[in-house]
Amino acid sequence: MRIDIVTIAKQMAKSFLLLGTLACMPSAMQAQITVVDEDADDDEIEVVGEEGVEEIEFPESMTYNLDSLMNQYMSKTYLTPDNDCQMKNENPTYDKEVYIDRLHRMPTIMEMPYNEVVQSCIDRYTGRLRRSVSFFLGAANFYMPIFEEALEAYQLPLELKYLPVIESALNPTAVSRVGATGLWQFMLATGKAYGLEVNSLVDERRDPVKASYAAARYLRDLYRIFNDWSLVIAAYNCGPENINKAIRRSGGETDYWKIYPYLPRETRGYVPAFIAANYVMNYYCEHNICPMNSQLPTKTDTVVVDKNVNFSQLVSVCGFDLQMLRSLNPEYRRDIVPGAVKPSAIRLPLQDVARFIDLQDSVFVVNSATDKRMVVEVEEDAAKSVKADKRSAAGAKWHTVKRGDTIGGLAKRYRTTAAKIRQMNGLRNNNIRAGHRLRVR
């Protein structure tokens, strides 16, 4: 994958200059974080800000229902409810000192402070979204090893592995209302800047492995800009430009909780939701949440093709399951592997690789409806006829019919025949009327 080094370098230089300039400006008062209204069925909460009561939004992923998450192939195939779970389906409440202590004891580098907005996000996960948390805990067996490996490769805090929980609810094909895509919810421009290929056939933002490494690189670069993990998380949500604006409007503060009132509405709920996600993924037992039983998917391997292949060919020739192919190869957005463009990999269950190798000649023979014509011939006779008509039209002569004119008379006058006049004007007989315009040559 390729990083747009020039773009990142410019952004880093601009941000360091801004932070250095604003450090000398007077500091703003820390935001007052007080929840005044919370509706468990709403997607917003009201808090007291510097300008009075204002609303903040929960991240979009906290509005998804479990049914949409369980509709994924991996979920339907490898996740089941734990019917042997002996925990009561009740969410106990604790004093805030308990939450403060638990957050403090989590083994994290990143700061995980407590306040009422964080508490509201914890309550949402442990209350309305507790069945979704069961799903997260089961699906974590699929995705967390991938996230951890990518984060470890760039020496980033491993607690960032819970970022896709609030980004996409661990749905690799999630698309937000603004077009962010995949587990890590990359916008198109950012994904391309970090080497993720996106075109009509391929969207690597949906590839769990490639997108995880791209996200790790992006997070690393954001930390080089802001040197504060809470600001990094916020910038991941709304972009570094909006963080810089909030810093400027706050009078130069670089503490997330002090620039809080100047952030976009969803970003105000984003860091609290991230803290809450870390909390609930660590303390789910204390809230009587049972993880779904997960059976790890079978081992997979890849085969590389240098011809276009449609999943329908693999289904008809090899007998593979279409949903399985889509789940293991989510980057192919129209079920077409564009091997003719460049050698492309198809991920298959290990036991199916040998079957593909044995049948690949038959696969390529089947009509895939994916090959585009490289050369198209034009009918020469038709082309000549068109050219002749154009030349003929260029030298055409017209006559406006007057009272007393006849087809025969016009034919003699313009030295042609009545039959040709009828043919040129699409006439079935010799009837003509005054005022009509006729082609006569």
Image (spheres, helix red, strand yellow):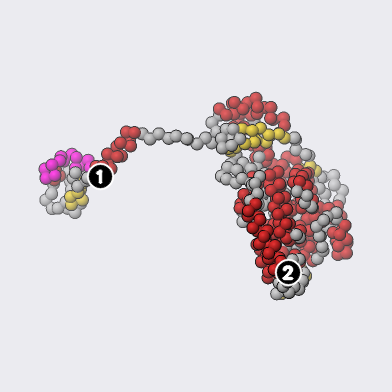
Q: Amino acid at mark 2?
A: Ala
Earlier along the polypeptide chain: callout 2 or callout 1?
Answer: 2
Q: Disc 1 marks which residue? A: 393
SS for dot 2: loop
User: 110 or 430, which lies in front?
Assistant: 110
Q: Which residues make up the magenta segment?
A: 412-424
Q: Which residue is depicted at the point 64% across and 45% down?
A: 204
Q: Label 2: few (<14), some or many (≥20) within 10 Å?
A: some
| Left or right of residue 200, residue 435 in this image | left
Number of dots carrying numbers:
2
User: 217 or 437, which lies in front?
Assistant: 217
Q: Main secondary structure of the magenta part?
A: helix
Task: Name the disc covering residue 23, or none.
Answer: 2
Q: CA distance from mark 2 to mark 1?
A: 77 Å
> Is residue 412 at all visible to an observer of this figure?
yes
Q: Amino acid at mark 1?
A: Ala
Residue 423 image point, x, y percent: 22, 40
- Residue 83 is inside the magenta segment: no
For the residues labelled 2 and 1, say whether their Cβ atoms are less than 8 Å apart: no
Q: Which residue is depicted at the point 82% across and 56% down?
A: 109
Residue 240 image point, x, y percent: 67, 60
Of the two numbered discs 2 and 1 in the rendering, the one whose residue sits closer to the viewer: 2
When asked about the image quadrant of residue 24, the answer is bottom right
User: 433 or 410, which lies in front?
Assistant: 410
Residue 281 image point, x, y percent: 81, 52
Q: Label 1: few (<14), some or many (≥20) within 10 Å?
A: few
Residue 27 image point, x, y percent: 75, 73
